[in-house]
Image (spheres, rainbow, N blue to C red):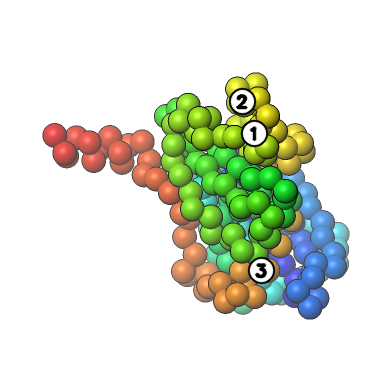
Amino acid sequence: MKILALETSGRLGTVGLLEASDGQVVFSVERGTPSEERTARSLLPTVHQLLKEQNWRPSDIDLVAVTAGPGSFTGLRIGVVAAKTFAYAVGAQVVGVHTLAALAAPLLPNASRVWTILDAQRQELFAANFAVGAAIEEQLEPPTEIIATDAWLQQLRSGDVVTGPLLEKLQTQLPAGVNAAAESQWNPSAIAVGRLGMLKVASGGAISPLELVPDYFRKSAAEEKADAAEAV
């Protein structure tokens, strides 16, 4: 199976190609998009350049995996649209991957509880925790909280491991005994997205391109403001 993986949930996008045999990844390569301009115009050229470098044709791709949420509204829309368009054009399967699971994947299984966090704006964050010693295969759709930063910090306990791009701001606020992951693991990678996509397909999680939609996990600020106005 040849997999195209797209990760566009944050400021910078990454594109990955993976090849799997008998449920194991035997080859992978990853490339960042050339700028923070997360548009299909910047993403798709990176995809085609990476395919060209590996002497793969677009039609060789069997599966397109993409982070479907949570994350940046704009980034998720761009990644999902690109995944749908590419998969539909070449007849590939497609699967959406939970961003917080993609963050956790390189750290699991772990002897400590793992927390993954993303900025949810409005002094809140998206947070999920992953059980001690459990493999990522068992936690592909983790329960996800939208929680105030201060309230989340109070949930942490000694021995916990935390990862996510928000550590740029929060690392110094972690309680004593709580460990930050290595900085190289703070952002989800397209390779992790591709691996989790392969696992979801193995458990029957593939869908048609037309079914793929972003999961924002919350309404936009404008939508929440409108809802509040209607409730008055």
Q: Residue at x 59, y 59 (%)?
A: 139
> Residue 166 is drawn in which quadrant?
top right
| Residue ID for mark 1 | 158
Front position among marks 2 and 1 = 1
Of residue 42 and residue 161, the one placed in the foreground of this image is 161
Q: Residue furthest front?
A: 158
The amino acid on which the numbered mark 3 sits, given as a three-letter code, is Leu
Q: Is residue 69 left or right of residue 220?
A: right
Q: Residue at x 52, y 42 (%)?
A: 127
Do the residues under discs 2 and 1 have CB atoms within 8 angstroms?
A: yes
Q: CA distance from mark 1 to mark 3?
A: 31 Å
Estimate the x, y position of residue 129 in percent, counting from the top left. Answer: 57, 47
Q: Residue furthest left?
A: 232
Q: CA distance from mark 2 to mark 1?
A: 8 Å
Circle 3: element type: helix
| Residue ID for mark 3 | 199
Do the residues under discs 1 and 3 have CB atoms within 8 angstroms?
A: no
| Residue ID for mark 2 | 175
Of residue 72 and residue 141, the one placed in the foreground of this image is 141
Do the residues under discs 3 and 2 have CB atoms within 8 angstroms?
A: no
Circle 2: element type: loop
Q: Which class describes the residues within 10 Å of circle 1: few (<14), some (14-19), or many (20+)?
A: few
The amino acid on which the numbered mark 2 sits, given as a three-letter code, is Pro
Front position among marks 3 and 2 = 2
Q: Residue at x 57, y 39 (%)?
A: 117
> Residue 201 is drawn in which quadrant?
bottom right
Estimate the x, y position of residue 52 in percent, counting from the top left. Answer: 82, 62
Estimate the x, y position of residue 138 in percent, counting from the top left. Answer: 61, 64
